[in-house]
Amino acid sequence: MRERPGHGGRPGPREGSIRLPDGRAMAYAEYGDPAGRVVLGCHGSPSSRLERHVEDPEDYRRWGVRFVVPDRPGFGRSDPQPGRRVVHWPDDVARLLDSLDIGEFSVLSLSGGAAYALACAAAFGPRVRAVGVLGGAPPPDVPWPWPQWVPRRLRSAAHRPSPAAALLRPLFAPVALRPAAIPRYLQARLNPADRRVIGRPEVRRILSETFTEGLRNGAAPLAEDRALLFRPWGFPLSSVEQHVHVWHGTQDWQVPAGLGRVLAAMLPSCTAHWLVGEGHFAVFDHAAEVYGALRP
């Protein structure tokens, strides 16, 4: 494991990589107290192992948290996994946890990582002590409202398994060319609360860094990841037996709050926290509350 240099005197993450049984590399990063309670991060889409939810990474150490975030297949430095499904993710996670000698843990997701966090909760059972979902959406059992700028043929194609990723790839290609500009683009098009959060220099730097790393292999992994969210995830939400905390900004223009309400209603045991007037990146103002709720 190596330590990435930090920024402005702040410590960087500890980084490593493991080799999976089929030969793929799986990269990961971790912050905080090596002896702390483990929170497995399921990053957004696009994003990477460099995703974190605090401006000062020392907060993790102060809270007694060991925050471990692996790159999903194709993102960052993890190799692609042809033909993968959401339900396959816990198999990779199990190998990582074993290599790091981790027993019980909590799981936390942001945005497009929700499906993967819930898949882990379903697969690992009581080994997962707590579950948190930030700005997440439900499985495709419920039709998602697409933004109007997405062409109609792509909306329908996303629900079909084979051509969906290929059709979505051109849509995301411009994003992959300049990933460092994504925070500036989001700041221009999201609600005032998100513009305020992303306007903070450290938040913008964190997002720029994790988006750039996540898209180091181009648009294909992002297109595949998004397409998978619109196919059946491979497990019923009724199999998530743990209590799930959902946090969602009522002014989230990226994943509308209505989707968060559907997700919360579908989960067998859930506490929904509606952040009035806030947006998709509200976690940067509520991290202490979020991580406190995940304390075993």
Image (spheres, helix red, strand yellow):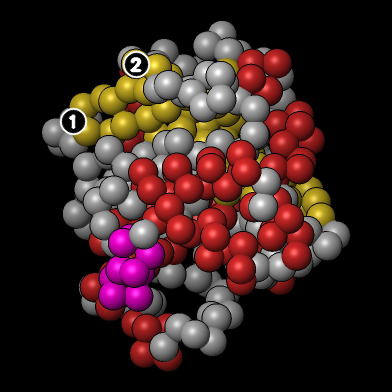
Q: Is 159 above or below relative to 13? A: below
Q: Is 166 above or below relative to 119? A: below
Residue at 42 percent across and 91 percent down: it is 152
Residue at 40 percent across and 17 percent down: it is 3
Which residue is denoted by mark 1 in the rendering?
A: 21
Residue 172: x and y in percent read 35, 69
Q: Quadrant of the C terminus?
A: top right
Q: Residue placed farthest to the left in the image?
A: 23
Q: Residue placed farthest to the right in the image?
A: 276
Residue at 69 percent across and 59 percent down: it is 194
Q: Is 226 above or below relative to 85? A: below
Which residue is denoted by mark 2 in the rendering?
A: 2
* Highlighted range, magenta: 169-177
Residue at 64 percent across and 34 percent down: it is 55
| Numbered circle sitting on residue 107 | none
| Amino acid type, label 2 | Arg
Closest to the observer, 194 or 230: 194
Q: Is 122 above or below relative to 281? A: above
Q: Quadrant of the N terminus?
A: top left
Residue 86: x and y in percent read 39, 53
Q: Is residue 172 magenta?
A: yes
In the visual, does 80 lie left or right of 280?
Answer: left
Closest to the observer, 223 or 5: 5
Indicate the secondary structure of the residue bearing disc 1.
Answer: loop
User: Could you classify mark 2 by the number of other residues whose Cα lies within 10 Å: few (under 14), some (14-19), or many (20 or more)?
Assistant: few
